[in-house]
Image: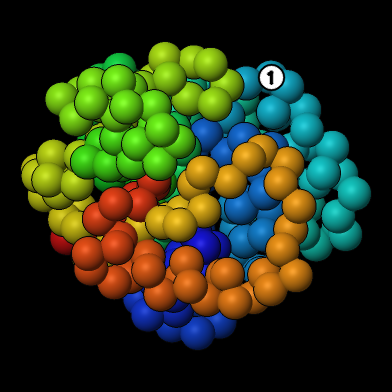
Amino acid sequence: MVTRQLDEQIVGRFPVGKRLRVLDVGMGQGTQALRLARAGHQVTGLEQDAKMVAAARESLAGEPEGIRERMRIIEGDGRDTGVHFLPGSFDVVLCHGVLMYVEEPDPLLAGLARMLAHGGLLSLLVRNGDALAIRPGLSGDWSGALAAFDTTAYRNRLGLDVRADRLKDLTSTLAGIGAPLHAWYGVRVFTDTAADGAEVPADLETLLAVEEKAGRTDPYRGVAALLHLCGVRG
């Protein structure tokens, strides 16, 4: 879903065929970064986990030379973008699945916005702080659901204590850092309670169509497990 939504925003904002300068902060094993490099863009991946960096470099090593030349990988903290890059160096900045691990996200977000050229796209994927009661509620964990209404803290499936973000707060933050919210989507509206490693259903394309529709339709997108927010540098 995030890939489809991101591509929709890129196509709608930049000329067809333009080679974009992309920064993927917290790129993990490089799935999204490598996909964009294959599409012809110049991609920089920034990741602080050494194991993830090694996995990304291994994946990149298996690509044709042209793709390898379009992608570079830097081991480092996403809060230190100013150390590695000049302001306005990128057309697109991705930060997917990172903010939940950052106790004070505002300085990180301000740094990401500074990396964008005028008109550049900031893509964030965050845990939805307005819907934390959904997962425990649908699982019959009534005490967990009750507690989730009044907090943005939660324990993820890895057993880590992390945090979520509310749409209202991020909208305000993005406006304050000069990259106001342009579009937002819900991700995992109906599928968040699926067990890890669950078998892929035979009607996968229909499932994806339902999730895609729900992710852009009110009121469904507001209760999604994740929010995909796209800000534009003014």
Q: Position of residue 208 (x, y in %)?
A: 56, 70
Q: Is residue 67 above or below residue 138?
A: below
Q: Is residue 207 above or below residue 43?
A: below
The residue under the point 73% across, 41% down is 197
Which quadrant of the view contains residue 81?
top left
Which quadrant of the view contains residue 78?
top left
The residue under the point 45% across, 48% down is 94
Locate residue 159 relative to residue 147 in the image: left or right. Answer: right
The residue under the point 43% across, 20% down is 155
Residue 95 seen anywhere in this rendered image of the structure = no
Q: Position of residue 37 (x, y in %)?
A: 67, 60
Q: Nearer the viewer, residue 157 or 111?
A: 157
Q: Is residue 228 above or below residue 131?
A: below
Q: Amino acid at mark 1?
A: Ala
The quadrant the C terminus occupies is bottom left
Residue 65 seen anywhere in this rendered image of the structure = yes
Q: Nearer the viewer, residue 228 or 23?
A: 228
Q: Position of residue 139 (x, y in %)?
A: 45, 36
Q: Which residue is mark 1?
A: 50
Q: Nearer the viewer, residue 218 or 28?
A: 218
The residue under the point 48% across, 73% down is 210
Locate residue 80 relative to residue 166 in the image: left or right. Answer: right
Count of numbered badges drawn on the protein: 1
